[in-house]
Image (tube, rainbow, N blue to C red):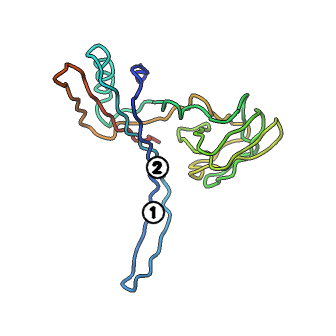
Amino acid sequence: MSFPTTPVFQDVTVISVDPTLVSEAVSGRTQARKVSGQRWELKASYPPMTQADFMPVYAYVTSQRGMLSTFTVRIPVLEDARGTASGTFLVNGSKTAGQTVIAIDGGTGTLVEGDFIKFAHDKVYMVTAHTETSGNTTSITVTPPLITSISNNSSITYDNVPIKVRLKNDAQAFVLAKDSMFRYELDFIEAL
């Protein structure tokens, strides 16, 4: 059973958590060091719902047993590329963890800044540089850097991008208002 697609989220806050260690000396000099482990967090809220609309959502969330289980969600609007991308985009040549510029081939059209994409593993990346393609080799720039190696000819998902998540909290509460409408918010964290 997958996460219910109806009703649709009313609002979604997308947060990029990108840990950095910063230390400051007594003199005021600071040093910053990047720590790998970027992840996406989502805060989603629903419009007021009837009991019939709310209970399937709450039953699914409760069945996840707090932060224990993982599942996929799609962010309305952001799940699809904004550019004119079509066809099958493939990674051109093997890439190692830590790279941000990924050579691609196949497919046509554009992937633009802010598009979410996914390679053949669970991590979701964001395109940070506009890319034109026409079946010839080109490249895209992504953030964060690759968390794992990807092989030549791995496909790239740019539409209907699922984000593998878990609940951010073990406690899940809802509000039953005086008008008999249910109000509900969820916090997700990307699961890798």
| Three-letter residue code for mark 1 | Thr
Q: Name the quarter where the N terminus is drawn.
A: top left
Name the spot of residue 53 as percent of width and height, x first.
32, 16
**Residue 65 in the figure: left or right of residue 111:** left
Name the spot of residue 44 as percent of width and height, x first.
37, 35
* Above/below status of 10 relative to 7: below
* Disc 2/disc 1 C-alpha distance (Å): 12 Å
**Location of residue 28 (image quadrant):** bottom left
**How many residues crowd mark 1 within 10 Å: few (<14), some (14–19), many (20+)?**
few
Name the spot of residue 139 as percent of width and height, x first.
74, 47
Of the pair 149 and 190, the residue shown nearer to us: 190
Q: Residue at x 44, y 52 (%)?
A: 17
Q: Which residue is mark 1?
A: 20
What label does residue 16 carry, if any?
A: 2
What label does residue 62 carry, if any?
A: none
Q: Say whether marks 2 and 1 touch (CB < 8 Å).
A: no
**Residue 147 in the figure: left or right of residue 177:** right
Residue at the right extreme, as displayed: 136
Name the spot of residue 123 as percent of width and height, x first.
53, 42
| Three-letter residue code for mark 2 | Ser
* Above/below status of 176 relative to 151: above
Q: Residue at x 32, y 27 (%)?
A: 61
Query: Circle 1 sits in a helix, a strand or a loop, which is it?
Result: strand
**How many residues crowd mark 2 within 10 Å: few (<14), some (14–19), many (20+)?**
few
**Residue 124 in the figure: left or right of residue 168:** right
